[in-house]
Image (tube, rainbow, N blue to C red):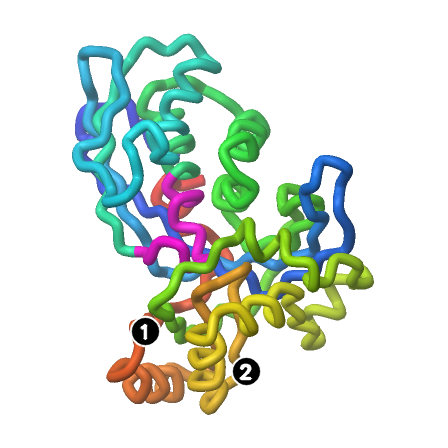
Amino acid sequence: MENLTNPKAWAERWPAPAKLNLMLRIVGQRDDGYHLLQTVFQFVDLCDWLIFHPADDGNVRLVRTISGVPEEDDLTVKAANLLKAETGCELGVRIEVDKKLPMGGGLGGGSSDAATTLMVLNELWGLGLTKEKLLRMGLSLGADVPVFIFGHSSWGEGVGEKLSKIDIPEQWVVIIKPDCHVNTGEIFCAKNLTRNSKSIKMLDFIEGDHQNDCLAVVSASYPLVRKALDALSEYSEARLTGTGACVFAQFDSYDVAIDAYSRLKGNWVVYLAKGLNQSPLYAKLKL
């Protein structure tokens, strides 16, 4: 890893990539209500971008807040303050977030922002925390945070925090963001949600088992998600990422993907992206 404690490193723009859930099975539920999952995460090259500015007052602040999110509830602020609390660090920071990823779409933008904050400030502040420690801290901020710290496409179990590397073809992806926000809590509390799916093996996924147990509930509750799935399914297998609202399809060919993207963008908010097995944050950190 390059030395990041020099002043120039503070001016860098740091990526916080999106993720897709390529499969999501609910295989049980813990006594505390958390659902036990099997899922597959892959990154895509759509990113928020973070810049960290040193602050002499020892406080953690945002350069600008995100509409509808109080500063103290922003996951980047929580992540930076967690680092300070865990290490006794007295340094301050101003966090600037260039928000490119849609909120509430199931792409993990807030969790990714938190992970980038933990990993980059660990270096900029010279804290020396291990990856294992950062993973535990990330889980305390949210179930999706650890995969962004893990940094590689993953087979996830538990509540999503038990991660194993999996290499997946890095295909082109077309993503539609319907004009709605899916309430994840409501989906996981739905009476008709499947909670007892049979566990599968990695090979089952590789051979084409892409089941998402949230799909039926989300489709029934959010007509725009159903319409987006129908529109995208004209071009390839359309899937829901997590609880949505974003839906996606994978393509082997850029030409086929760009054709689908071009045809859909007149009626939908659409993104064209590339699947990535390694997080672009890891590439920039040279890990």
Is residue 106 covered in magenta?
A: yes
Q: Secondary structure at mark 1?
A: strand
User: In this orientation, which residue lies closer to the viewer: 31 or 131?
Assistant: 31
Name the foreground residue: 255 vs 100.
100
* Quadrant containing the C terminus in the rendered view: top left
Of residues 113 and 130, the one drawn nearer to the viewer in this rendering:
113
Quadrant of the image occupied by residue 172? bottom left
- The residues colored magenta run 101-113
Looking at the image, residue 50 lies above or below residue 8 = below
Q: Residue at x 40, y 28 (%)?
A: 79
| First reached walking from the N terminus: tag 1 or tag 2 | 2
For marks 1 and 2, give the CA distance. 16 Å
Residue occupying the point 42% across, 20% down? 83
Q: Return the x and y of residue 178 as percentages of the image width and height.
A: 37, 70
Residue 30 image position (x, y, % from top left): 76, 41
Instruction: Report the magenta stretch's main SS.
Output: loop
Mark 2: amino acid: Glu
> Which residue is nearer to you in this view: 272 or 81?
81
Q: Is 131 above or below relative to 269?
A: above
Q: Amino acid at mark 1?
A: Val
Tell me which residue sits at (43%, 78%) in the image.
228
Q: Is residue 39 above or below residue 123?
A: below
Q: Which circle marks residue 119 in the picture? A: none
The residue tagged 1 is 270
Q: Residue at x 32, y 47 (%)?
A: 15
Choose top left, top right, bottom left or bottom right for residue 62.
top left
Residue of label 2: 237
